[in-house]
Image (cartoon, grey):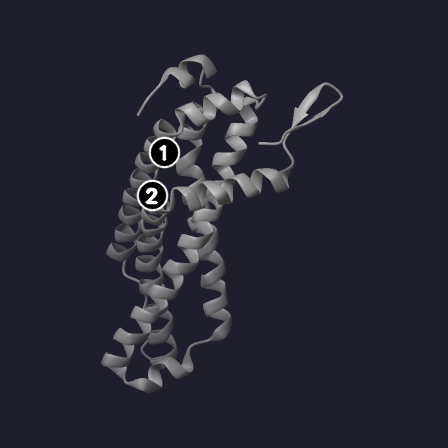
Amino acid sequence: MNPEQIHGKIKLPISEAFYISVRQIRIRFQRSKIMIASIGLGIAFMTHLNITNVIFNAYMSEVGTTVEAYQFWLLIISAFVCCVGLINSTLIAVYERYTEIGTMKCLGALDYHILELFIIEALLLGLYGGLIGFVIGTITAASSSMMQLGFDAILNIPIIEMLKYLGLTTLLSIILSVGSTIIPALRAAKLNPVEALRYHV
């Protein structure tokens, strides 16, 4: 941790915060994989439904198909389960890092520095999870559509629609990840450094 002191205020450069966050993800790679998988599975399910809908609409334009109402409820439920899993994982990560957070605070880190580190981690995990989920969801949607409609089905997929869903799912995964991290991150930021240093997992 290398915060800078400018005009009496301690400042953590964004590049340093990014470096620390990436390092934390690597150090806790097993837990990071669980969080990425939680995000990825929810995004993959949503992508599968949406891309399947795009393929069917492109292939059967005269008949047309849409995502049924019950499928939207499934998406909402999967997003909720994803958020619960992320909050739980982040809370455990906070407990595991009590001593580390206490040490950073003793070295001069402020509450918003701690919050910034957790938010950057959540943003990166959300980005990774969203991209992985989109790829998996697209592959499963294309595979299932080919089994039902034949190989020609995927030749008519509009590239613009694919890019639109890539952007939307990535943005959603980041929002889910960061949103689920806010409460645990605020809790970590408000830790008393003395109590944090006495805590042992």
Q: Indicate whether 187 appears above or below 119.
A: above
Expressed as whole percent of the image width and height from the top left, the position of residue 174 reads 46, 47
Q: Amino acid at mark 2?
A: Arg
Whether tag 2 and tag 1 are in contact, CB under 8 A, the answer is yes
Which residue is under mark 1?
A: 93
Expressed as whole percent of the image width and height from the top left, the position of residue 165 reads 45, 62
Q: Quadrant of the C terminus?
A: top left
- Residue at screen point 27% across, 46% down: 77
- Residue at screen point 36% across, 75% down: 55
Q: Earlier in the sequence, mark 2 or mark 1?
A: 2
- Residue at screen point 56% across, 42% down: 18
Expressed as whole percent of the image width and height from the top left, the position of residue 70 reads 24, 55
What SS does tag 2 mark?
A: helix
Near mark 2 (Cα within 10 A), the count class, few <14, some 14-19 or many ≥20, is some
Residue at the extreme top = 194
Near mark 1 (Cα within 10 A), the count class, few <14, some 14-19 or many ≥20, is some
Q: Nearer the viewer, residue 116 or 169?
A: 116
Q: What count of labels does the image hold?
A: 2
Q: Amino acid at mark 1?
A: Ala
Q: Which mark is residue 31?
A: 2
Q: Indicate whether 143 appears above or below 88.
A: below
Q: Nearer the viewer, residue 35 or 198?
A: 198
Q: Indicate whether 96 appears above or below 47.
A: above
